[in-house]
Image (cartoon, rainbow, N blue to C red):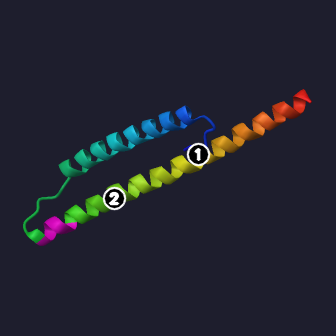
Amino acid sequence: MHTIFKEEKTGDAVNNILLAAYFLLNIGYSILKITEWKTVVNLSEMLNETTINIGQIVLLLAILHHVNIIALIVGRKIINKNQSVKLQAKN
């Protein structure tokens, strides 16, 4: 985060917000998936359902993580571009 944001406090704040959002999303999605589980008859079905649901949660979090990183990098580039245009306009 410190490479994206120039101020350390801003980077830490954004990092904490994203971390809390990931935790809340993970808990909410996990609860939703647990309530939708099929009836399990044996150990094999239980392992199958558990691994599928864990895989879906991990995949969703990975996609969201990459989308957030890309958005932060693009946002930083836009901010840097706007700042350089303002500096050029002053000179």
Mark 1, secondary structure of its residue: helix
Which residue extends farthest front? 8
Query: Quarter holding the N terminus?
Result: top right
Q: Quadrant of residue 88?
A: top right
* Type of secondary structure dominating the magenta stretch: helix
Which image quadrant: the C terminus?
Answer: top right
Left or right: 41, with 90 as reference point: left
Q: Which residue is mark 2?
A: 56
Q: Residues within 10 Å of mark 1 (few under 14, many from 20)?
A: few
Mark 2: give few (<14), some (14-19) or many (20+) Cα within 10 Å: some
Residue indicated by mark 1: 71
Judge left or right: residue 38 versus residue 13: left
Q: CA distance from mark 1 to mark 2?
A: 22 Å
Instruction: Specify the amino acid type for callout 2.
Output: Gln
Q: Residue at x 54, y 49 (%)?
A: 69
Farthest residue, direction top: 90
Q: Residue 13's spot in the image, x, y percent?
A: 48, 33
**x, y percent for residue 30:** 26, 49
Q: Amino acid at mark 1?
A: Ala
Q: Nearer the viewer, residue 54 or 79?
A: 79
User: What segment carries the magenta color?
Assistant: 44-48
Q: Secondary structure at mark 2?
A: helix
